[in-house]
Image: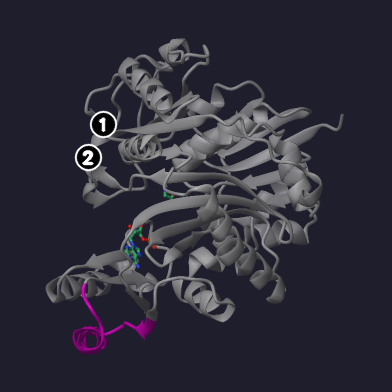
Amino acid sequence: MPSHNVLCIGSGGREHALVAAIVASEGLEVCYAAPGNPGMAALDKVQCVDLEPANHQDVIAFCREHDVTLVVIGPEQPLVDGLVDTLREHEIPAFGPSAYAAQLEGSKAFAKEFMAEFGIPTAASELFTLSTDADALAIKEWIEHQANLPIVLKADGLAAGKGVFVCETLKDVTAALEQCLASESLREASTQLVVEEFMEGEEASVFVITDGYSSKILGVAQDHKRIYDGDKGPNTGGMGAYSPAPVVTDALLNQIQQTIIELTITGLQVKDAPYTGILYVGLMMTEAGPKVVEYNCRFGDPECQCILPCIQNDFIKLCETTVQQELDEVEVTHSGESTCCVVLAAEGYPSSYPKGMLIRGLDQVETVRNESNEPAMVFHAGTATDEQGRVVTKGGRVLTLVGRGATLQEAVTHAYKAVDVIDFEHKTYRKDIAQKGLYRLQWLNRLQEK
Ligand code: AMP
Ligand code: GLY
């Protein structure tokens, strides 16, 4: 059995789930997590290391020094920055797309042009430049005369989830344009602005693993982006998710595979940039069929925490097979369970929030069992250890709790039971994760009974 030293880049709940899957793989010597978090540090064979992924030469030197045999990259920024390209140039196996392919997430203008070229269904859009007040005025006038409201404005570049504005009125359009010009971080991302038709429907995400030629669906999930119950309040990184999402029926998934996933993968082959890694396709289930809302070039957070625990393959082997472009030889096996994950946040998130609150009950999560006697799972995100070695809060999204079950209802009950054993001051979370899925299942059951 070959031995592996794996480097996993990232520090969130998604990366904790990735590291847990790496640790569960055969033949692991050490998993280095850069920078990791206390949840990862507590795992057997994991070492958290201080390594800046933006400094590619440091990453290469680290990989050489520690005989790293595989690099797994969690977040989008290092992918968009071309870390995979640099690693490949140095013959270090890396799981993730090249900078070119990562533009599917890194540039909305690139993604829209790509979809238009390959006939992939998405919202109609126009591209504008936005650097001055005069540009803003021209965009507003174009919308007033040529478009229908609501309308969606999207900064071209990465904007940490803050670059999309769904505008109901012209006043909202003005406010969004002003924000793009005024905010230092957004200004750069929105020098190109995509103005997009509003799509009506329910959202879902499909997660695909691909070596650029062969692709396998890992799972379908629904995220909860808004901070409050009932999808109210500002957008966040994601407050919870569940999988599978019944809004995506088998027939729809088939359609998505043919009209979206296969075309995306062959489109990148045509561009001479076959995609390696996880492709996350955000979709709107419209009356005219599924359409792409966005591509992401990595796993979702918290969707990863819902999907990865159900994948029964040896994860290191799965990544290696993908990097070696031999994915067609592998069967991806899913446990068939439903999962639900609930994010515990610090009150105030996504704006300012307090830090350093003591987290109690982490050791109790394992004792929360579902009907099959499986433990609930906890993945750390914004946590730290204090001087006494206790785990305290450090970020807005603090922990993800994951429940599993033979049914979605069982998974939801399991997850919320785990939520109850964790306590910290200013703990907040959504109480309605997966309700949409449960309603839909009830409705489908009623239809079947008739
Ligand atoms: P994105 O970052 O492109 O996923 O956009 C963030 C969120 O904005 C999506 O999850 C949707 O809820 C919403 N959104 C983006 N584009 C559209 C669209 N064309 N129509 C309706 N809602 C959209
Ligand atoms: N949960 C949404 C994302 O990871 O982009």
Can residue 323 be seen from the camera position used here?
Answer: yes
State the residue in front, 450 or 378: 450
Instruction: State the extent of the magenta-drawn residues as a range.
Output: 126-149
Q: Do callouts 1 and 2 mark residues in contact (Cβ within 8 Å)?
A: yes
Instruction: Give the class, few, some or many, for how many residues have Cα within 10 Å of label 2's Cα (few <14, many ≥20).
Output: some
State the residue in front, 99 or 420: 420
Residue 344 in picture, x, y percent from top left: 32, 31
Instruction: Give the class, few, some or many, for how many residues have Cα within 10 Å of label 1's Cα (few <14, many ≥20).
Output: few
State the residue in front, 398 or 340: 340
Left or right: residue 300 compared with residue 6: left
Label 2 sits on residue: 229
Q: Earlier in the sequence, mark 1 or mark 2?
A: 2
Picture residue at 33% right of the left edge, 59% below the top:
201
Q: Quadrant of ligand 1?
A: bottom left
Write down the quadrant of residue 211 in the picture.
bottom right
Label 1 sits on residue: 431
